[in-house]
Amino acid sequence: MTTQATSINLTSHDDVVRVEDLKVNFYTQLGVVNALNGVSFNIPRGRVLGIVGESGCGKSITGLSIMQLVVAAGRTEAGRIMFREFAGQEPPINILEYGKNSPEMRKIRGNNISMIFQEPMSSLNPCYTVGNQIEEAILLHQTDDKSEASKRAVEVLTKVGMPNPDRIAASFPHELSGGMRQRAMIAMALSCNPTLLIADEPTTALDVTTEAQILDLMRGLQSEIGTSIMFITHNMGVVAQMCDEVAVMYMGRVVERATVDDIFYEPRHPYTISLLQSIPRLGRSKGRLSSIEGSVPDPYSTTPGCSFHPRCPVAIKGLCDTIVPEETIVDAAKGHTVRCHLNS
Amino acid sequence: MAVDAAKLPNTAHATEDVGTIPQWKLMVRRFRKSKLSVSGLILLIILYTLMLLSDFIAPYQHNRIDSNYAWAPPSQLGFANGKVVTYALKQTLDEVRFEWIYAPDLENPIPVEFFVQGYPYKFLGIIPSSLHLFGVPEGSQINLIGADKDGKDVFSRLLKGSQISLTLGFVGVLISVIIGSIVGTASGYFGGPIDNIIQRLIELLRSFPDIPLFLGLAAALPMGVPVEVRFFLITIIIAMIGWTGLAREVRAKVMAFRASDYTSAAIAAGGSHWHVITRHLIPNAMSHIIVVGTLAIPGAIGSETALSFLGLGILPPAVSWGVMLRDAQTIEAITNYPWMLLPVGVLIISVLSFYLLGDGIRDAVDPYA
């Protein structure tokens, strides 16, 4: 397996999570959907990895797989997710070996790996105060002492820059704005000092001003606490602001993996290049904005060869439409890899 | 300036409280807007107070027989010497219809005395007492709303009957709410085959016609058991049939909440099934459960009355409103002794009050319904 060989060569032992050849299928009444077709990537400790791609490319499923929260219809067919709670932990834990609802898995969730969801409006239970919900995770994992938990809830609310944290802790979700709720969600996710934070498009539902504030906050907290972040988004602007490294996904595969600078200045995969070209830029108003030809194929069909070939402007006939390109190293030092025949 | 500085923290404190009216206060506000529901609640409070104090208010034991007063009409009340009085009854025999004809002996007033000693009872079931709200001297009788064929005081029976009729519905619904919530939550939360089995079971139970099912279950009850045991068993029967509707509604609610992001967030925070169900799903469904429960109580009261009316529920000498209606089912009672039908009136009032209360609660907890 070239895939595994490359990822082992490229990475040090200080990865928080290493996803290896992950395959997830969804069995629906309309047929089988290959949501993930062998996803491999690593999240280095203390860094922010951006996962970028169009809707339906498997970004969220990858995040949910790490948490083992994929719905019942989705089945993990192959692959490993190796998790190291602390640097140099040997052997690493394969998360997929735990049962979905096993006590071990529940201990990892929220405690070692936590998650922020897209919709801050509906992610908080309307029945309880914000403080109460932050305490919940602390009580589940860290302490049994209620007064200790509520003290820590206020502490963590202060940490996420909430004005008047005591009052916020005592208020109900409907009394807070979207930005404040997302701050509360971040506070909740960070309440147990997780090793890894999975943020699934945490700013999509917010306006740009609030988005900038939330990203600022996450970046600041990340450098302060050192938590690794897996940042799922479809917004290249957010990637540029937020991430250290980027994995570009298309149709359930990571097609390119590089540092954030390399993705923006030396993209290798035609899909990455097209994605970057389709971002509107200030001051360049002449001509139509270029877009990627065609649309994402029907999820129930399988595309032979490179899954991007039907939309690829530089596809090679007879090669790209028959053989799946392997992951190849562009720059071993920076960990730049790409899955494209043009680069092999 | 010094005064201003001292005032400042106060103002800051005052602004902090703005917009933080707790949810339940908002509910109370919305509830109070509906006059009908408030009157329903007041009526129920009165009914239940009367029920709790029934032994104190009732002048006679519910099964005290006095054949001298068979079918006695309601006692006439009046004032004499600044005291409330009632009158002794003159009995004459109607020789054609062979019936007693009663007429108040207006020359012979009997003073009604308040806070008198009467039959012994246990106040609220605990404190032994024999004090009664009112009574007349030994040898005469007061039947505020008449007497039945054995001369039993209908007023006392009505009060005593409320003890069974009003609590049985309540307890029955409580049990069915508990069963319904547990089964409905399990069905909605776990889904798949568990949901399928539970839903088919509910359909099976619901496909039985109610009355024959009641009859079948009631007929299976042992006859020789004490009143309390029979009461309990009938409660169980009512609950067994009542939980299905609630279970379905709870299931629908739980399914919606299960798909919500805060449930995912709770699972992502490492919560177990039990934790998610008890912390997130049931509290959210609670307002709905309370409303459905409140609206189910009148049905359960009706079921008890129907069972007792058919002679399969509460059995004499115990008394419930259904038992009293059983005594009133002859044409004779309806034409000659209309006071025997009074339980119907009380039953309608209590059932209506529960419906009004339930409607009010529903509007209060969910302003969009």
Image (cartoon, coloured by chain):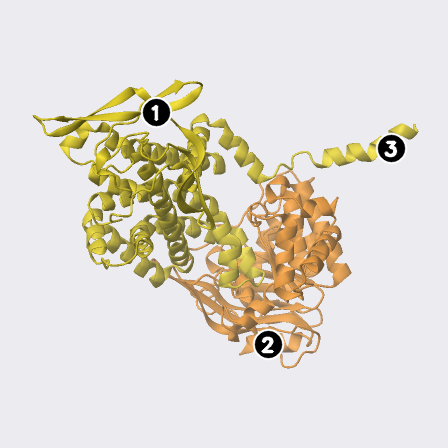
Chain colours: A orange, B yellow
Circle 1 chain = B
* Residue at the bottom extreme of this rendering: A91
Residue contact at pointers 2 and 3, CB within 8 angstroms: no
Mark seen at residue B86 = 1
- Residue B250 lies, with reference to residue A85, above or below; the image says above
Left or right placement of residue A322 versus residue A206 in this view: left
Q: What residue sits 40% from the left and 59% below the top? A: B186
What residue is at 20 percent from the left and 47 percent from the top?
A: B311
Residue A55 in sight: no
Q: Amino acid at mark 3?
A: Ala
The residue carrying pointer 2 sits among few (fewer than 14), some (14 to 19) or many (20 or more) residues within 10 Å by Cα, namely some
Instruction: Give, as a three-letter code, the residue at label 2.
Output: Ile
Badge 2 vs badge 1, beta-carbon distance below 8 Å: no
Pointer 2: what residue?
A93
Determine the residue positioned at 7% across, 25% down.
B96
- Asked if A88 appears above or below A137 in the picture, the reply is below
Tell me which chain the residue with mark 2 is part of: A
Lower position in the chain sequence, tag 3 or tag 1: 3
Q: Is residue A108 left or right of residue B202?
A: right
Q: Nearer the viewer, mark 3 or mark 1?
A: 1
Residue, x 14% and y 31% (percent of image)?
B332
